[in-house]
Image: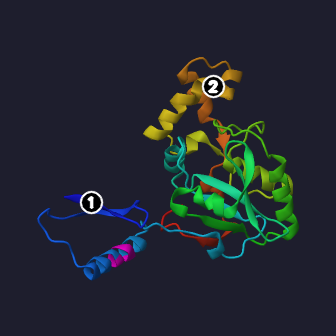
Amino acid sequence: MISLIRDSEGAAVGDIVTKSPLSSPRPPVMMRQTLERLAVLLAVIGLAYPACAAESLPPLKTGDIVFQRTETNASDAIMLASGTQYTHVGLVEVDSAGRANVIEAVGPVRTLPIDRWIKNGNQGRVTIKRVKALGEGDAKKAALRARHYLGRPYDHFFYETRDQIYCSELIYAAFKEGANITVGREEKVRELNIDTGAAQQLIKQRWKAHPLCKAKSAGTFKACYSLIMEQTLVTPASIARDPQMELIYTNFGAGAE
């Protein structure tokens, strides 16, 4: 008989265990010890639920950049294309009361308290990075520029115009336009690993509505695909891997980026 180990709310949290339907129940102490050992093992290999409460985070500053994994139609494509677990990124702004909020592009650009932002991610995982030697003035300029895009629709095509905007583009634009600091780098789509099933499926689903292909009157998938390959974008991975970033906190396992 196969059963899932579940947490106190009944949600499955780990591996499966097998037991014979004729075996007698384990004593409570033995079962508790077994679960404790399993939790330690899962934590070591990075599979345990890494619950993160906002109050457990180190002190945050305006201009900090937060990364997480989200579950969207494009998440698998982004992870495989960029070789990272980070599929979403936001910019921290600390208000006058000391509360940390995140400015993010998801749907329309919006602000969200950091605790709610973390809960929206996969298993509460978050990585926080900071531009080395970032001055308070430049941090505020970046946040102010990010606020300029509040309400801007989400860009499902990752196109370089700013009439719609995607998450890592918002961070790139906030620092570049607000503080004249370049975080991450622009890459051609063809430089990424887009030969995966997830990436190819995403392109096939969206190419007919792609603004670049419409502008160039590319009426076939082949013609549009060639244009998309030359499109430039900024990924969450390129921002996370930028040498000028310093790690402030993470509860991701090894190899996240």
* Residue drawn 85% across the image and 56% down it: 144
Residue 23: horizontal and vertical position, in percent? 13, 68
Which quadrant of the figure has residue 74? top right
**SS at mark 1?**
strand
Q: Which mark is residue 232?
A: none
Q: Quadrant of the C terminus?
A: bottom right
Q: Is residue 186 visible to us here?
A: no
Q: Main secondary structure of the magenta part?
A: helix
Is residue 139 shown left or right of residue 1? right
Is residue 85 shown left or right of residue 197? right
Mark 1 crowd level (few <14, some 14–19, many ≥20, 10 Å Cα)? few
Which quadrant of the figure has residue 3? bottom left
Amino acid carrying mark 1 in the image: Ser
Q: Which mark is residue 3?
A: 1
Residue 119: horizontal and vertical position, in percent? 59, 59
In the depicted structure, whether residue 29 falls above or below residue 243: below
* Residue drawn 43% across the image and 68% down it: 46
Which residue range is magenta in the image?
36-40
Amino acid carrying mark 2 in the image: Ala
The residue beneath circle 2 is: 209
In the depicted structure, whether residue 50 falls above or below residue 224: below
Mark 2 crowd level (few <14, some 14–19, many ≥20, 10 Å Cα)? few
* Residue drawn 52% across the image and 66% down it: 252
Q: Earlier in the sequence, mark 1 or mark 2?
A: 1
In the depicted view, which residue is nearer to us: 58 or 17? 17
Q: Number of marks in the image?
A: 2
- Separation of disc 1 and disc 2 at Cα? 45 Å
Q: Nearer the viewer, mark 1 or mark 2?
A: 1
Q: Do callouts 1 and 2 mark residues in contact (Cβ within 8 Å)? A: no
Residue 242 is a magenta residue: no
Which residue reaches farthest left? 22
